[in-house]
Amino acid sequence: EPEVTQTPSHQVTQMGQEVILRCVPISNHLYFYWYRQILGQKVEFLVSFYNNEISEKSEIFDDQFSVERPDGSNFTLKIRSTKLEDSAMYFCASRSLAGGIRLSTDTQYFGPGTRLTVL
Amino acid sequence: AQSVTQLDSHVSVSEGTPVLLRCNYSSSYSPSLFWYVQHPNKGLQLLLKYTSAATLVKGINGFEAEFKKSETSFHLTKPSAHMSDAAEYFCVVLGDTGRRALTFGSGTRLQVQP
């Protein structure tokens, strides 16, 4: 069964450093998402991406964040200058366009997550 | 804006006894609702989804959930718990804006005692 993969599983970085989190969505999916979960808190939406551009982003997704689909398979989240409060589990998800863009039945499939620790 | 509230942060049951994980939603439209499960060091796996068809939804691993509009609830149940059901469970609602983002509940940790 196809699945979303993410690398690395755990990333430790110093405050102020740039990090890139990588995701390989399911191959025929066209919508991509990043979510994050700070320890002990809810899973929160960060950004959605379709047709090589951001569809929508949350208030969390400020100028230090960016997303990119550099090739046909990878989907990346870059944090330019990490802060202590960026420490969290970051989940990538993807979904197909089966049934059309507005059809609410589409399921998002999640990767295992990358645990980011900022020291 | 839509939201979901999971009424219990922790639920502990004995193996072989029923499971009930409670979720209430708030939405101005007919929502699409999901339950996801997260086992330790694993990703979020879809258990089941409600999309305005049958109000009783059957999922994987013997779980089911009933959509009750009058109570704005979408509780998750299983007749008989198994040790492998121990995990974190999330009730989730799908947004109807262009981003189609998911809004998660705070999660319920299910413990299964032998």
Image (cartoon, helix red, strand yellow):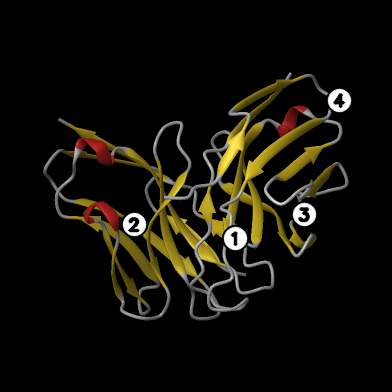
Q: Is residue B8 left or right of residue B95?
A: left
How far is the residue under mark 4 from the one under mark 2? 41 Å
Query: Residue under circle 1?
Result: A29
Q: Are the residues under badges 4 and 2 in a single subunit?
A: no
Of marks 4 and 2, the one in the foreground = 4
Q: Residue at x 63, y 76 (%)?
A: A101
How far is the residue under mark 1 from the one under mark 4? 33 Å
Q: Which amino acid, by three-letter code, is at mark 3? A: Glu
Q: Which amino acid, by three-letter code, is at mark 2? A: Arg
Q: Which amino acid, by three-letter code, is at mark 1? A: His
Helix or strand or loop: what does disc 1 sit on? loop
Q: Chain of mark 4?
A: A
For the residues labelled 1 and 2, say whether their Cβ atoms are less than 8 Å apart.
no
Q: Nearer the viewer, residue B63 or B25?
A: B63
Q: Which mark is residue A59?
A: 3
Of marks 3 and 2, the one in the foreground = 3
Of marks 1 and 4, the one in the foreground = 1
